[in-house]
Amino acid sequence: MTLLIPNILGGSNQQPLSTDSNVANALRQQGANEKQVAQQVATMPTYWGEQPNTAPYYAGAIIVFFFVLGILMADRKLLAWTIPMIILGIVLSWGSNFSSFNYLMFDYFPGYNKFRSVTFALIISIMLMNMLGFIGLEKLFKDGYNKKAVRQLLIAFGAAGGLSLILAMFAGVFSYSGAIDAQLPDWLLNPLMADRKAMLRADAFRSFVFILLAGAVVFAALKSKIKLPVASLLIIALVIFDMWTIDKRYLDESQFVRNVTRNYFAPTEADKVIQNDKAIDFRVFNLINPWNDARTSYHHKSLGGYHGATIRRYQDLIDIGLAVEHQQVINSLQSTGTLPSGMNVINMLNAKYLVAGPSAQAVFPNYEAYGNAWTANTIQLVNNPDEELAATVRVDNKSKAVVDKSRFPQISEHYSGQGTIALTSYQPNQLKYTASLSDKSLVVFSEIYYPEGWQATIDGGDVDILRANYILRSLEVPAGDHEIIFSFKPRVYSYGNTVTAASSILLLLLVVGAVLIEFGFIGSIRKPKE
């Protein structure tokens, strides 16, 4: 119903109320001054539906009105697929509220579990409602004024406008109580429910007015009281005004700030201290809310950050290893002001600096970080990924590499681990190392193992990329001096570039041929001389 009436369930889960609302008056009765009232009513839990962290998807009252008209006017063949798709979009957006269907889709429909939110499926419905509505409007104008056209226009108006008017008149039939109400004081509940009721009534009447105005324009155009181009412009203006005034509730002038990144991403004193380190490659671990911090990655390579689709193995390492060590670091800094020893996971991920705030004093160099690559003295073979993860967070990863022998049976326990290895060049898609080893060694690299697209060479010859310590790359490197290169060259990109180039050439030839034919050049070549 929010597609027709945006505030039918109170709008967003945090929405402002006016300073003359029932909640504002209740706050004044509790002794709040005007400044406190303004602050409190700016973010009130007006939403009273069952969906957490929500905001309404509003298709537009006029669009819904034209959509109903499209159902009445459009060709049956068109309705045969648009109506089921509109229903499907709405049903998909229900998510766990219709679990028997949506979990079936989530578990078995290819790619569906990659969507950020099921409510995005409403875009299918809204797009098709727009399309069907304006196809119906076009057919109405094409058929012209007649009794059937007037009857269908009135039916559409009665369905969309009538429903809006009924909801405005009988708004008192709903409870207006939401799940969050249990956390609110008793003196606030009744005023908040009264405001929710007022919001529904106001928006329902608002939708009715817009539908009435759009219907009047369409009827006047049918009766030839106004010309069709004028009617089209009026409809466009009404739709824009309808959507714009709702959009401003959630994105107003105060939220448009010039050069916001210049202030937010300006380097702090801590950033400047770290940037003085000119080493080729290392990482930074921000201890302040590390798993939702995106700012650190603006200036440094980071151990933390946020992504809606984190690599599963890295998330496992966060849950079992990094999160535990993060708490150990916090406890040590609070009690002694120094970093603890034995941070196996943080060290193997080459976190050279840990940061606990914006000041220069909040930067803690980690002298135990393992660096970009190292040779393993001993190899611990395990039987499965669970054992691999458990051992990785427990052992000293600088001297011992943990390998899942069920996945990499070619790795043995016999390597010397003697020699040096250094990163000489770093680019996101290519890393170069030099190695000098006294004997065959298993070299561990502080880079995430992700075999899709990555290739490795030793002195120009291809070698297999192995995995150690649950998430890191490793290679078997023979004795001697070598150059090791990791390159990201996924075949799908190469094939895609080849296909794109071939398609572009073919398209160019077709365009040139069409131009030559159009202007008669090809025809003149084929014509015999007189």
Image (cartoon, helix red, strand yellow):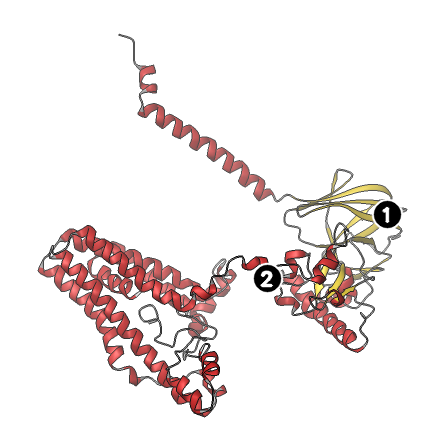
Tell me the number on the disc at residue 264. Answer: 2
* Residue 67 to residue 480: above or below: below
Residue at the location (41% across, 85% down)? Answer: 23
Of residues 37 and 437, the one nearer the viewer is 37
Tell me the number on the disc at residue 236. Answer: none
Of residues 234 and 88, the one nearer the viewer is 234
Relative horizontal placement of residue 466, taking residue 415 as reference (left or right):
left
- Which callout, 2 or 1, points to the residue nearer the camera? 2
In whole angstroms, how far apart are the C-alphas of marks 2 and 1? 49 Å
The quadrant of the picture occupied by the C terminus is top left
Circle 2 — which element?
A: helix
Q: How many C-alpha atoms fall within 10 Å of the one at disc 2: few (<14), some, or many (≥20)? A: few
Of residues 361 and 486, the one nearer the viewer is 361
> Disc 1 residue type?
Lys
User: Reading the chain from its start, which is encountered first: label 2 or label 1?
Assistant: 2
The quadrant of the picture occupied by the N terminus is bottom left
Residue for badge 1: 440
From this viewpoint, is residue 75 visible?
no
Relative horizontal placement of residue 409, taking residue 167 as reference (left or right):
right
Relative horizontal placement of residue 499, taking residue 275 as reference (left or right):
left
x, y (%) of residue 229?
20, 50
